[in-house]
Image (cartoon, helix red, strand yellow):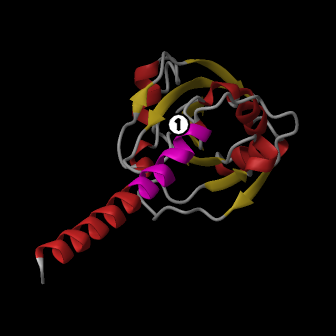
Amino acid sequence: MTGRRRGAVIAVVLGLGLGALAGLSGFFAWPMRVQSQALMAPSHPRFTEAKWPFPTDEWGEGKAFRCARADCGVEVNVYIRAKIGFCNCLTGVSDDNELDRLSDFNLMGGKPQVLGAGHEIKIAWMKGRSRAYAVSEPYHAPGSVLAIAFNDRCDAIVATTTVAHDAPKELEPSVIAFLNSEVVVHWAEVTLGL
């Protein structure tokens, strides 16, 4: 191969490689730009039951619910399950340390980054806390998690909410309202044996 031909082949290969690299970076960056746009609270969120996607562990399976992008502005998944006898019987879910201890971070592959202090919430007759976390994985759009736990005496209900957006605070009222819905409250009563 002559020097001129070799140079042309190298130039073509480099051009194709750079084009592929630019295309991939655009592909992975596009969802990140979209997910970082302002998020408005949905006016009529609609959660539908889905299959529990996680392997069975010491806490067993729970209930899974999904709110599609068309109904919530972004995809939102709520995973709830009971942790019988695992809550502090005297104080309940009264601080962020207890919330962190109860939360299902293992479902997400580890503890995500805290976005701020937690705050009190009320689900039916139970009190608890909610706290937002950021989840960042390579080559994925930014996401976030709301860790929510509430209790009846020594028994806790833990809700892990994944949000396909980097700022979950706008969706938290919709999630809390859903956790107060008849579907979830009835499930909690049956699961806790009330």
Q: Which quarter of the image is occupied by the C terminus? A: top right
Amino acid at the residue labelled 1? Ser
**27 magenta-colored:** yes
Q: Is residue 85 above or below residue 67?
A: above
Q: Which percent across, then down, holds residue 156?
A: 55, 37
What's drawn in magenta, residue-wise? 22-34
Q: Horizontally, is 112 left or right of 118 in the view? A: left
Q: Secondary structure at mark 1?
A: strand
**Camera-side residue: 190 or 70?**
70
**103 magenta-colored:** no
- The part of the image, by quadrant, that contains residue 63 is bottom right
Q: Residue at x 77, y 38 (%)?
A: 178
Q: Which percent across, then down, holds residue 34?
A: 61, 40
Q: Which percent across, then down, holds residue 132?
A: 53, 27
Q: Residue reaching furthest right?
A: 44
Q: Horizontally, is 76 left or right of 98 in the view? A: right
Q: How many marks?
A: 1
Q: Residue at x 81, y 46 (%)?
A: 71
Dot 1 corresponds to which residue? 144
- The majority secondary structure of the magenta stretch comes to helix
Q: Which percent across, then down, holds residue 24?
A: 43, 57
Residue 152 seen in the figure: no
Q: Residues within 10 Å of mark 1 (few under 14, many from 20)?
A: many
Q: Horizontally, is 135 left or right of 35 in the view? A: left
Q: Residue reaching furthest bottom?
A: 1
**Camera-side residue: 111 or 188?**
111
Q: Residue at x 56, y 46 (%)?
A: 31
Q: Which quarter of the image is occupied by the N terminus? A: bottom left
Residue 42 seen in the figure: yes
